[in-house]
Amino acid sequence: MPDKAAQKQRGSRPSIRDVARRAGVSPGCVSNVINGRRKLDDPIGRAVLQAVRDLGYRRNTMASNLRRSQSRIIGLVIPDFENPFFAELVAKLEHRAEATNYRIVATSSREDADIEAREIDELVGWRVAGVFVIPSLHSRAAELVETSETPFVFLDRIQQNAATDGVGVDNAAASAALMQKLFDTGHRRIVVAYLGDGIANVAERLDGVRAAVGDCAQEVLVDYVPTGDSIEGARAALAAYLDRNPAPDAVFCLFNTATLAAYGLLQERGHVIGKDTALAGFDDSAWMAHVYPPVAAIVQPTEEIARVAWERLLARIEGGDTPPETIRIGCRLEARGSLGPPDRKAGASNDNGA
């Protein structure tokens, strides 16, 4: 079997036929794998990718583009690069792109609808093959892409009734399940911290919370605190709430920045997390599993989101003309130590930050 050393000795670049021989498949199978037309994680896909790595195979992208008159660039517009969930999703999509000989150009809207519109317009102007968008606060992306010939897929913050595909999670079901867990554990006074109005997935998470409250047989009190998108804003909003109200049994943060702000604030004010006050967040971050007690989280399946979204966009690039589809993927709950049952006596001593 030829390898990189043999290819170098021959003075030639490995071909698609070399890859096929190495993987024990047909050249057509190799083409399907590297162009994203078949799964990467089945036996054939893994064999082809291993052969590509072993041989150092690189397709002649310029020649391919000239033959197919098609860009190999995928645009990606996200709200920011600092959010751990967005960063992880970008990394998963880049892995998919590399495996299928595409490249991703990622840019940030900085949660500004005008910047987002400009970035989308520029990417379309570059004639990219397709674009992923995680819409910004008060996004107008759904309107912008309606008449575009460029394929789009919305991620995470799915625009309802948009004339394009969307891939995200079942936000409402995940939030309802977390609230039910709090009720079952004995929590009756709960603060829900959320980013603010104007974002689709936040609205869905709030819907799930409210549905769980409506279905709860026990008497519960749930307060909703809008926090803004920064740690400083979330901390200030939660501090103002704690100054005016009795200490809650639990704090459920609907996005990860608020979870970090709440963790620091509760610790500073002497609340024993998992005893005085439960804490949970929508979205997991590395720090949450490595503090004591570890912080409970709703975990979004970024690998599955990236896979489904990538397959959907490639199908559009290949000319698929099925009606736009919204795809929802289930989350899982990591019920860690911060969800301990409430200590009513201890919690009362912490009212108003005392």
Image (spheres, rainbow, N blue to C red):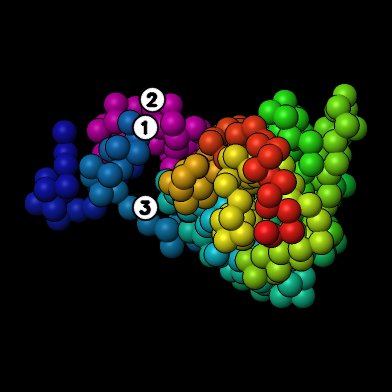
Who's the residue at 47% across and 51% down the image?
Answer: 287
Q: Position of residue 149 (x, y in %)?
A: 75, 58
Do the residues bearing badges 3 and 2 touch, measured as CB atoms within 8 Å?
no
Kind of residue at disc 1: Arg
Residues in magenta, as a range: 17-46
Who's the residue at 34% across and 27% down the image?
Answer: 25
Kind of residue at disc 3: Arg
Do the residues bearing badges 1 and 2 touch, measured as CB atoms within 8 Å?
yes
Identify the main secondary structure in magenta: helix
Number of other residues with Cα within 10 Å of mark 3, as a class: few under 14, some 14 to 19, many 20 or more: some
Kind of residue at disc 2: Pro
Number of other residues with Cα within 10 Å of mark 2, as a class: few under 14, some 14 to 19, many 20 or more: few
257 is higher (above) or lower (below) than 116: above
Q: Quadrant of the N terminus?
A: top left
Who comes first in sequence, dot 3 or dot 2?
A: 2
Q: CA distance from mark 3 to mark 1?
A: 18 Å
Residue for badge 1: 46
- Residue 135 lies in the magenta stretch: no
Residue for badge 3: 59
Q: Position of residue 162 (x, y in %)?
A: 84, 50
